[in-house]
Image: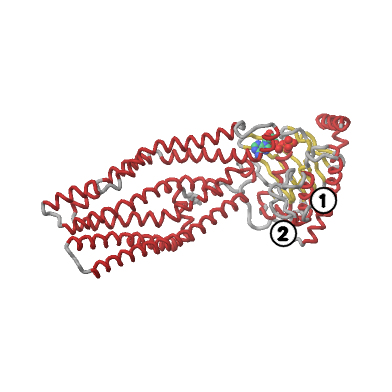
Amino acid sequence: MEKPKKKKGLARLAEFAEPHKGNYIAAVVLAVLGVACGLIPYFAVSRIVIRLIAGERDFSYFLLWCAVAALGFLGRVLLHNLSTALSHKATFAVISEVRRRIAAKLTRVPMGYVLNTPSGKIKNTMVEKVDSIEPTLAHVLPEMTSNLLVPFAIILYLFVLDWRMALISLITLPIGALCYMGMMKDYEKKFGEYMAVGKHMNATAVEYVGGIEVIKAFGQSATSYQKFADAVRANANYGLDWMRQCQAYFAMGLGIWPAVLIGVLPIGCIFYLNGSLPAPTFITIVILALGIMAPLLSAMYYTDDIAKIGTVMDDIGAVLDEPEQIRPATRASLQGTDIALKEVFFGYDGTEVLHGVNLNIPAGSVTALVGPSGGGKSTIAKLIASFWDVSGGSVAIGGTDVKNIPAGQLMDLIAYVAQDNYLFDLSVLENLRLGRPSATDEEVRAAARSSGCHDFIMGLEHGYDTVAGGTGGHLSGGERQRIAIARAMLKNAPVVILDEATAYTDPENEAVIQAAVARLVAGKTLIVIAHRLSTITNSDQIAVIDRGRVAACARHEELLADCPLYQEMWQAHISAKDVA
Ligand SMILES: Nc1ncnc2c1ncn2[C@@H]1O[C@H](COP(=O)(O)OP(=O)(O)OP(=O)(O)O)[C@@H](O)[C@H]1O
């Protein structure tokens, strides 16, 4: 079956706007009527001037046209506001739908995409880019349509009154169009470049804030953090250069385009003097001609938004079109929870880091992954959790390839305790409850007690109601790790993957964490990425991972006897302990 073609730019925007078509059509109709009402005062003025010149003395006549002008003005304000309200209602619904889809998409793409994309870039797409849909959809659609349609109607009317004068009233149009074309030359390319510079600045800004501790610790200031300073300067310079290139065209267009009277007044006078243009028609044409260019000029401002929105929608589309991990919807029936990696190959961005990994992890066993830094331990653990898809071979749980297990079912099977566990800007209680949203307060507290969290939580200012803060705020690394263990306990998944933290090695913390882990994994399958060999000597098996391969897999004593790499690591570990 042929895949449906992904829509680009404005077509994609139209797809999002489709469910709100009714509101947008109503907004356009109201906007057109509004601009038409806005022309009524011009028409009324022409009536009044003509009758004044003709010597009219009846005040009620003038009053009537003043009232018509006022009604036209009021109608314009009212209809314009109604139109804007409708288009904004629809547009904010579109914006929240786009954001919802991006957020949902991030949960379906491989974890690698999210981890490897700077968070500033994702935030920029989700917040700023999506925000920039608003001016185009909410304003451009109704206002640009009306600002183009109404002058078109006036020009038609001018042709009815006097075709020669109608042509003359359009004299500045080609000059204005040329200026505009000059301004829009290479627009898409330039805007794309401007966006790229902005994106880079955003990413470096987030990196800068994230790394502020290092910057301060090494006495670096904002300007000496060269990457950030350069990105800010590049962004400002690009904007300035681009504005300079457009300035002359813009000023010329703005000056010449509305100057319709340049032709209408002198030539109209000639026609009037030679008797081919009656005075009332001349006056009506002069006044209506003044009303043509203002809406056209407003429409011109919106073309900038239209040109931008194509690039913005392509960027949003790039996130939405990211390939997803394909998983079935119906639950797989698994034969237990044994885990088997068969000839697993995997690489990041084309660089292979696992070269045929074979590993069997029986249900209920403790398996430690050890080995030199960069050997591939975390990658193996993440492939088991299906954060990425393997490029060759297979990872199976209970005899079924993880690719054939629905994402939800797999997540129920595995609790992943990472080194740096993110805590949401919620109370400690709610952060813990994320492990099992249906858990009662008492169950959450019981898990906290088992993982050695209860005492320090009670010592916090508001106990379990203390807000933990974006990255775990006021809690220490060891405390965050214990909260993550409590979260995993609540989840009560049969497989626990634990990336042992290297940072919190003070003996007191280590003992508490070890005790918590022991309670967490009782009767479960534990895969631990171990950095301190002393914690895993009792494991059922220890897999030594070296340069993307399993160098050996056996118990501690066997490895000490047969595996030179393990012997080396053990010696290094013992001497480090002796030194400490
Ligand atoms: N997200 C990523 N994008 C690109 N390359 C990565 C990514 N994560 C890891 N790598 C690379 O893959 C290789 C294996 O990394 P991995 O983190 O699995 O090793 P590790 O044995 O767990 O190391 P450590 O003990 O230092 O945590 C390394 O060369 C690493 O640079």
Question: Mark 1 sits on what residue?
Answer: 456
Q: Which mark is residue 278?
A: none
Which sits in the foreground, 400 or 147? 147
Q: Position of residue 315 (x, y in %)?
A: 51, 45
Q: Using a 10 Å C-alpha cutoff, classify the residue at mark 1 as few (fewer than 14 neighbours), some (14 to 19) or many (20 or more).
A: few
Q: Nearer the viewer, mark 2 or mark 1?
A: 1
Q: Camera-side residue: 99 or 301?
A: 301
Q: Nearer the viewer, residue 78 or 449?
A: 78
The quarter of the image holding the C terminus is: top right
Residue at the (73%, 56%) spot, across then down: 430
Distance from disc 2 to disc 1, alpha carbons, whole Å, reads 23 Å
Residue 393 appears left or right of 158: right
Q: Position of residue 319 (x, y in %)?
A: 55, 47
Q: Label 2 belongs to which residue?
A: 437
Residue type, numbered disc 2: Pro
Q: Quadrant of residue 59?
A: bottom left
116 with respect to 82 (left or right): right
Residue at the left extreme, as displayed:
274
In which quadrant of this rendering is ligand 1 seen? top right
